[in-house]
Image: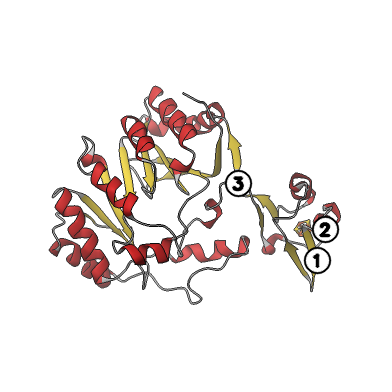
Amino acid sequence: MTISNLQVFDIKRFSTHDGRGIRTTVFLKGCPLRCKWCQNPEGLFPNRQVLYMENKCIHCLSCVHACQNQGVLFQDGKILLDRKASEDWETIVDACPTTALQFDSVSYSISELMHEIKKDESFFRYGGGVTISGGEPFLQPEGLLSLLTACKEEGIHTAIETSLYVNRKWLEKALPYLDQIYADCKIYDASMHQECTGVDNVIILENLRYLLTCAKKDQVIVRTPLIPGMTATKENIEQIASFLSSIYSQVHYEILNYNPLAKSKYAYLDMEYCFKKNPKLYSDDQMKLFYQIAGDAGIYNLIVES
Ligand code: SF4
């Protein structure tokens, strides 16, 4: 197997989400989807990018002086970045005394990443494990497989979060090394899916069918994040639930409440968030209605957020 480096934009420790026990979650960079509501916009692009955190900036202008080709400008009292400019970004980031400028990710070899992961091995002995998230982890398929193989060689429980917009070949190769699979099913209607995520959902639905008929179908949890006006409609939840239950009546399905926390990340990347006014979490009563719709459409094993 080819051993590749992995571009990682975060390692979160002590997580109690996305897998059993206490998890170490590794976030791999790059995603083929462009969901309008993406919760991890820093994970969208496969290459390393520079982040600018205005709240840490003391306007010392060291970055402006370190740049050669106008990649950093000071205009109207603001630092402006042109990330496409040909610059020595290492030098510019190093010049910043306050870490207002930072790279969004780090390249790890598999052994370096395993070294980081194994710092948490005491949790792995008591039921925890590693969750690979993103971005879309399968966008770095060789490195992902190497990482999963290394985890299993150490006896570590593994989980993955995937959009399922992935080549079946890599999904099949990864499956023997996965103990839990969190698979997204965001929007059933093809044109709405294309409009809201930038890609067609045919591959995703075919991969869902494959997962829910394979030997590991009971280790699959299908998820829909509730996004106002996009995924969070009666029709969408009904269509997804009917589709899933028609493939496997005991499918595990989870409806995730809207998460308003992503909005602040967009400013660091000079990107625009899909909602100008950030919607609120759905109330318990509203969530119960979504659960009811899924139940009526044939879902028995509904995972309810606590
Ligand atoms: S070097 Fe850092 S603190 Fe100084 S102006 Fe640039 S971003 Fe701000």
Q: Nearer the viewer, mark 1 or mark 3?
A: 3
Whether 305 is drawn above or below 121: the answer is below
Residue at the spot x=37%, y=67% of the render?
A: 227
Tell me residue 28's x, y (percent): 50, 43
Whether 6 is drawn above or below 134: the answer is above
Instruction: Respond yes or no on whether mark 2 lies under 8 Å from ligand 1.
Output: yes
Q: Read off the residue under disc 1.
A: 74
Q: Read off the residue under disc 2.
A: 64
Q: Given the current orientation, which residue lies at the most extreme right position? A: 65
- Answer left or right for 258 relative to 72: left
Q: Dot 3, crowdedness within 10 Å: few (<14), some or many (≥20)?
A: few
- Answer left or right for 63 relative to 286: right
Q: Dot 1, crowdedness within 10 Å: few (<14), some or many (≥20)?
A: some
Residue at the spot x=14%, y=54% of the render?
A: 300
Q: Read off the residue under disc 3.
A: 47
- Identify the amino acid type marked 1: Phe
Q: Secondary structure at mark 3?
A: loop
Q: Are marks 1 and 3 in contact (CB under 8 Å)?
A: no
Label whose residue precedes the other's in the sequence (1 or 3):
3
